[in-house]
Image (cartoon, helix red, strand yellow):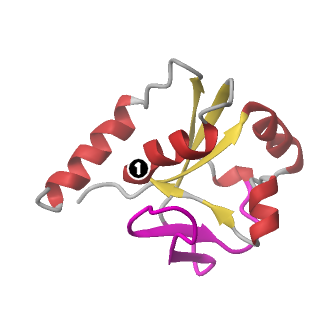
Amino acid sequence: MPSRHLYKVLTTQQWEQAQHSGSLAAPVDLADGFVHLSTAAQLAGTLQRYFSDAAAVVVLQLPPDLGANLRWETSLTGNRPGEFPHYYGDLTADRVSNTWIAQRNAIALPEEILLQVEQDASANGS
C-alpha cells in the first residue's frame, strides 16, 4: 500500500520561526483557523499556486496519522479538485519526519515524493 505522508510548505523564515515556537501554523493558517496541508499528489500544485514568488521554501513531511484533528475538506479557493488535509489545532514541529529545501527556479520535488505520486497514481489505476 502506498505511503500517505502529508506535507506542509513554509517559507524559510516561517520554518525558522516554527523551529523556535514549535508551531507549524503560518499566517494563512492562523487566519483560516486550520493548518493547510497537502498530499504528495497535491504538493506541486500548492508550490506553484502559493509559493512561486518565494526565493526558497521548506517542504515538511508529516505522518499520515495526525489524529482526530485532521479533516479532509474541499478547497474553497480556485478549482483544485479533491479534498485537502486540514489540521485543526496546534500542529507542532516535532511531528515533522523529514524536510527539504526547494529553491526558486530550481524547484524539483524530492525523488521520494515523486515516486509516491507515481505509486499512488498506479494504485488508483491512473
The residue type indicated by label 1 comes to Ala
Q: Would residue 72 appear left or right of 30 to someone viewing this image?
A: left
Residue at screen point 44% across, 42% down: 44
Q: Which residues are magenta?
A: 65-92
- What residue is shown at x 17% (from left), y 62% (from top)? 124
Q: Is residue 97 above or below residue 89?
A: above
Residue 83 picture quarter: bottom left
Is 68 within the magenta?
yes
Magenta span: helix, strand or loop, mainly? Answer: loop
The correct choice, above or below, for 88 with respect to 8 in the image is below
Could you tell me residue 16's position as x and y percent?
Answer: 81, 35
Most foreground residue, 14 or 93: 14
- The N terminus, quarter of image: bottom left
Residue 91 picture quarter? bottom right
User: On the image, numbered disc 1 is attached to which residue?
Assistant: 40
- Indicate the secondary structure of the residue bearing disc 1: helix
- 98 or 88, which is in the foreground? 88
